[in-house]
Image: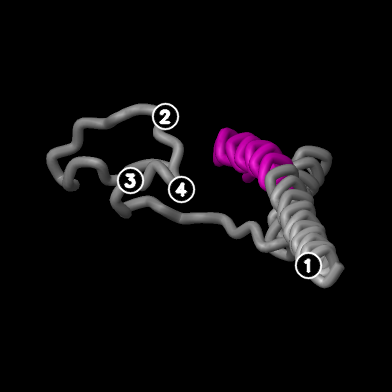
């Protein structure tokens, strides 16, 4: 009877330990799933932010200097939208990288093309 009691106690301890491990594993899986979802969303929003910047950079200087109030308001609206998006991303821990001149790191950078440039070392980010 004592042996059976010891076996039952041992089994109960093992079940309790397994339940605790399951709880921890589930909590970690939920955390990882949320982080992965947020990372994907942030990556998509960075793409939108990049396109806003490209749109602003594509505006000719003469057009910016023109006195058209509607056009200036449109430019200011796009700039404000870009700043608001970047600010919101930063509040959630997503920061804009400025890798120009740094060595290419595939963990942080996405190569679009290679540019032969004898003025910089190989695998250097030359354009963002």
- Residue 63 in view: no
Q: How far apart are marks 4 and 1 (CA)?
A: 59 Å
**Where does label 1 land, which residue?**
3
Up/down of 29 relative to 113, above or below: below
Q: In this view, does 108 lie to the left or right of 96?
A: left
Which mark is drawn over residue 42?
none
Mark 3 and mark 1 lie on one chain; the one further toward the N terminus is 1
Which one is in front, 75 or 61? 75
Depth-wise, is mark 4 or mark 1 nearer the camera? 1
Q: Which of 27 and 89 is in front in this view?
A: 27
Dot 4: element: loop
Taking the spot 13% from the left edge, 39% from the top edge, the residue there is 118
Q: How far apart are marks 2 and 1 (CA)?
A: 69 Å
Q: Give the residues in magenta.
A: 38-65
Identify the image quadrant of residue 64. Answer: top right
Whole-angstrom CA distance, mark 2 to mark 3, is: 12 Å
């Amino acid at each position: 009877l004592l042996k059976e009691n010891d076996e039952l106690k041992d089994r109960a301890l093992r079940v309790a330990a397994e339940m605790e491990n399951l709880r921890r594993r589930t909590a970690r899986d939920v955390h990882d799933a949320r982080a992965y979802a947020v990372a994907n969303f942030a990556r998509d929003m960075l793409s939108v932010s990049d396109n806003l910047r490209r749109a602003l950079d594509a505006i000719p200087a003469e057009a910016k200097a023109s006195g058209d109030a509607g056009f200036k308001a449109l430019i200011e609206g796009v700039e404000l939208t870009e700043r608001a998006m970047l600010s919101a991303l930063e509040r959630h821990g997503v920061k804009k990288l400025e890798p120009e001149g740094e060595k290419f790191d595939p963990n942080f950078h996405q190569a679009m093309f290679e540019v032969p440039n004898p003025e910089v070392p190989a695998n250097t980010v030359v354009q963002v």
